[in-house]
Image (cartoon, rainbow, N blue to C red):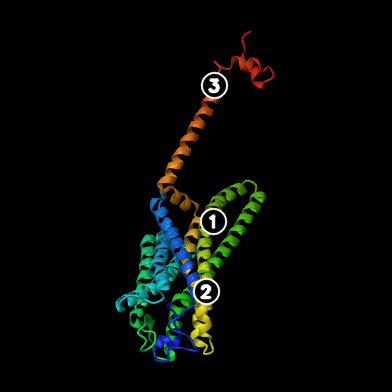
Amino acid sequence: GSSPSPEAWSGSPNGSLGGWDPFGRDEELAKLEIAVLAVTFAVAVVGNGSVLLALRRTPRKASRMHLFIRHLSLADLVVAFFQVLPQLCWEVTHRFHGPDGLCRVVKHLQVFGMFASAYMLVAMTADRYIAVCHPLKTLQQPTKRSYGMIAAAWALSLLLSTPQYFIFSLSEVERGSQVYDCWAHFIMPWGPRAYITWITGGIFVAPVLILVTCYGFICYHIWRNVRGKRRPGEAAGGGGRRAGGGGPRRGLLLAPCVSSVKTISRAKIRTVKMTFVIVSAYVVCWAPFFTIQMWSVWDQRFPWVDSENTATTVTALLASLNSCCNPWIYMFFSGHLLQDCIQSFPCCQKIKRTLSKEDSNSNSRRQTSFTNNRSPTHSLNTWRESPHSKSTSFIPIPT
């Protein structure tokens, strides 16, 4: 795999730790990892590709939320193609097979996808914070601000992942072994700690702190807004009952405003709920991975032999699942995306046209039958046979 021990990171002659064999691996665990990575890659590509296709074909006017969903799906596809897929190939071949330049590019793109997914999520949450807590600012060139936030997320991700070019290189797993792999090199003992702490802080800790802060303000604003709407509503109802002629006028002035605000709040709350679920999925998927990574470099008693076979592998697989669960969250909260996605496929369009044609013919037959049964020229005998019908007292029947 691509997660050697700290001693192996340094490229020192004493690369093996506690009997760890740099030339071997647990083949059974490797097979499981290959299977999970293959399924994750397929589901991530199909799911995020379907979301992008649905957003492209949707007849509705694209909103800012759709814009952020599109770019978050693109970031997840970057993770799928440049993190999950290289790792899958790496596990199949056991060692990295390629030149030194390709090694550096692959490691850069792997971390670039992680940064992009995290920072795009931060940008989306910040947009929800502005929409809920500062709604007037959404009227001041909202599209321009949204594109600026998205461009900043991509640019910052590209910049912060650049050190990978200088840290990783193609090198021998043990000096004189003639076995090469794409590994990192650090100054011991603080190098691995600085690197893992930096990656954990930049990709996980800092974004999560921003996300928690934004959601704290959002929840407080929604709570205050709901509480504020209940009080004027109760006051308006009481005033209407007490004031006689003046009450209805006061109620009419207040009711439309409250109703309008309530409708807008529901739409905003739905997008806030969706973003909250996406954030929760991100934390659940990535927290175990970064916890194990920090533990491995800060605890000198950390059992690296066991981690290579269990904790590191399992948490890395869990983290990779994040890129394939987001599309289904989008479709769950935006039902029309799933419909638009299904209608994008030719076979589904043909089935829909067939069903629509059959339904149209059925409606036409029902309409014709209804018209014939109710027509005065065709219903004479029918009305005559129904003397107890209420309609007989209004329709003259010749005898």
At 53% across and 64% down in the image, what residue appears?
277
- Find the distance from the CA under tag 3 to the CA under tag 1: 47 Å
Q: Are marks 3 and 1 in contact (CB under 8 Å)?
A: no
Is tag 3's residue or tag 1's residue first in the polypeptide sequence? 1
| Quarter of the figure with residue 106 | bottom left
Q: Which residue is at the far right?
A: 388
Report helix, strand or loop for mark 3.
helix
Residue underneath mark 3: 372
Residue 266, labelled with which disc? 1
Three-letter code, disc 2: Val
Three-letter code, disc 3: Asn
Label 3 CA crowd tier, 10 Å (few <14, some 14–19, many 20+)? few
**Number of numbered discs:** 3
Occupied quadrant, residue 387: top right
Single out the mark in the foreground, 3 or 1.
3
| Image quarter in which the C terminus is found | top right
Which of the two marks, 2 or 1, is nearer to us in this view? 2
Q: Which mark is residue 84?
A: none
On the question of residue 193 being in view, the answer is no
Q: Earlier in the sequence, mark 2 or mark 1?
A: 1
The residue singled out by tag 2 in the image is 314
Vertical side of 274 occupied by 176: above or below = below
- Horizontal and vertical percent position of residue 261: 53, 55
Q: Earlier in the sequence, mark 2 or mark 3?
A: 2
Q: Is residue 88 visible?
A: yes
Residue at the top extreme? 399
Please, what secondary structure does the residue beneath circle 2 have? helix
